[in-house]
Amino acid sequence: MSDQSGKHDELVHPAARPFLWLDAKWLKSSMLWILLVLALGFAAIDLFHHRHEYVHVAETPGFYALWGFGSFVLAVMVGWFVIRGFLGREEDYWDGEGDQ
Amino acid sequence: MIEALYDVSPAWPVIIAGLIAAAVPNHHVRKGLALIAPVLAGFLWFNVPSGVHTGGIIELGGFTLETFRYDGLSRIWGLIFIIAAFINALYGLHSRDRVGDASGLIYAGAGLGAVFAGDLLSLFFFWELTAISSVFLIWGSKTNEAYKAGLRYLAIHVLSGVMLLAGAVIHSADTGSWAFDESLSVNTLGGFLIFLAFGIKCAFPFLHNWLQDAYPKATVTGAVVLSAFTTKLAVYALARGYAGTDMLIWIGAVMTAFPVFFAVVENDLRKVLSYSLNNQLGFMVVGIGVGTELAINGAAAHAFVHIIYKALLFMSMGAVLYRVGTVKASELGGLFKTMPATAIFCIIGAASISAFPLFSGFVAKAMTLAAVAHEGHYIVWFILLFASAGVLEHSGIKIPYFAFFAHDKGHRVREAPVNMLMAMGIAALMCVYLGWPDMFGIPGGYRALYNLTPFPEVANEYPMWTFDHVVGQMQLLLAALFAFAFLVRMKWYPDEKRSINLDFDWVYRRALDGTARWGHAMFGRLWASIGNVLAAARTRIGGRLFQAFSPMGAISRDIPSGMLAIWTSALLAIVLIIAYIAP
């Protein structure tokens, strides 16, 4: 296996070296807070600016932020518990009789 | 402008180049053909005078075939098919595959031919040609799974063609016309059969699994080529024949939503892209169902940008497959360290499909959403909004994150070949250009896209770059990104693991296949049982006959002459009595 950080790995592409910080632990641990601040920041704009929408409920402050968060969580949970839970199979499932 | 070429469909140079490529063993000549043919097609496209043009008429067997109908709808689809054919040729330059080169060209040409077809018979010809030529892009992988998936793909698409022909014949008998236009209707048998034929190719719910089955098993280049033509041809066909058909709104809405759930837990990243493709088609189908000028513009613009960014994503995953040998999310991670350019191109594709402002998806999807809301389809609008967050999940985050970032799996491979990088670079530039706003009095790149739409005046009147629109979209995307980070931090995000998920294809690959096998086995047994019964009966009857007529049988036994005389007398008496009584 290669050097995980890539700093001393000669096989890392020269163009990628300036961006190895993207793999840094501090960035991974702080990404949650960075995104939270950005999401709240854009949601907060609605407090000072009234958006005009075709669908009136979308004019509720922070509507898109709430819908985006809820939709994402719903997609992941349904995918995880319903699709994988009920329909997930071993990788060699189709190697059986029906696929011959 | 060369007037003599006005009637030549851009499909022909591409198809002819494919036929020549099939016969040419020299790799460089084939690649030259693959690059030159789309350029020639592009020339023919530009050569046509603006407005509506009908040409390429062929009289055949009493039928009039119209091979080149150029109007607002076919114009935009034709151009993007030509661009896609060129980018695909560039991407596949490294591959030494004669069959792949030839089939890729014929397939692209057939797609163009179908787009420019003005009648149902021409459409049928090119429709079937797309199916037959494209299957070689799947078989080119030369694996058993690809071979079987290719057979299923071919069967389903030939069925689509047969339904199209049957519908066309019935439609023609009803109306006396073979025209491929808005006269089609789902309320007639012929029209409904054609609608179903289009629905199969468009991967409607329950008719969709050929897509997720076949595309991930195609060759590295094949998947890129396949992603561009088949399904978008079907979208075009729906826009041409069934714009404003209400049921398309709900069909499209379902198409946008259900693939999201499957993509979340899919491990094969090219299969994730196939589900994502299904989801994107849903937006276009909704737009066609709404059927207003703004909605049709939305569908057309979406198809245009989608072909580019979806090809870009398939190209990036193809490059990963080419270098690493797998696109299983569970086996990937950290590839940005060795494939940085591919990673950047993939991120641009991901940003475009997620509809981030300044990228092409943003300016296309917005028109469809606005048209849906404007026509009062609020539930569908909410579903599309959900699907927009879903797109971000599977294509915006999952594809680049698990391939290029996440946990470094230690793959130290080389960057993608130069030709692949060039193809991805062109696609990435287009993703940015087509999403670029008006700035400092200079028209943005999105204007070029809007001017290509079937109703450019309507498109250009649409207030695309408003503060409200940008803020709303950024709220949606950033909150969804935060949701991802939150779920990962809480360990509530499912692990990528080596597994598959059953989909509707289980019905025909396992249930119907099992039923057919069971039926075959039962019929075999029944046939054997009938044989046994017949054999037993034959033995029994034969035995009886033998007992009666054989030399030792009952009939052959010696009968005493006295007894014979009595019987003869009795029979004579009976005959005399009958003769006496009879009148």
Image: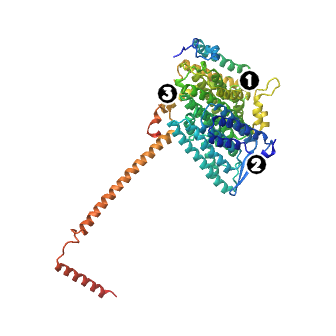
- Residue drawn at point x = 47 percent, y = 39 percent: A99
Point out the image quarter for the C terminus of chain B: bottom left
Residue at mark 2: chain = B
For mark 3, what is the residue? B498
- Front residue of A91 and B141: B141
Q: How is the image coloured?
A: rainbow
Amino acid on which disc 2 is placed: Gly
Q: Secondary structure at mark 1?
A: loop
Point out which mark residue B496 bears: none
Above or below — where is B539 with respect to B476?
A: below
Residue at mark 3: chain = B
Q: Residues within 10 Å of mark 1 (few under 14, many from 20)?
A: few
Amino acid on which disc 1 is placed: His
Point out which mark residue B55 bears: 2
Point out which mark residue A50 bears: 1
- Front residue of B254 and B331: B331
Residue B307: where, in percent of width, then height?
A: 67, 34
Residue at mark 1: chain = A
Q: Is residue B575 visible?
A: yes
Question: CA separation, marks 2 and 1?
Answer: 53 Å
Give a yes or no on whether discs 3 and 1 share a subunit.
no
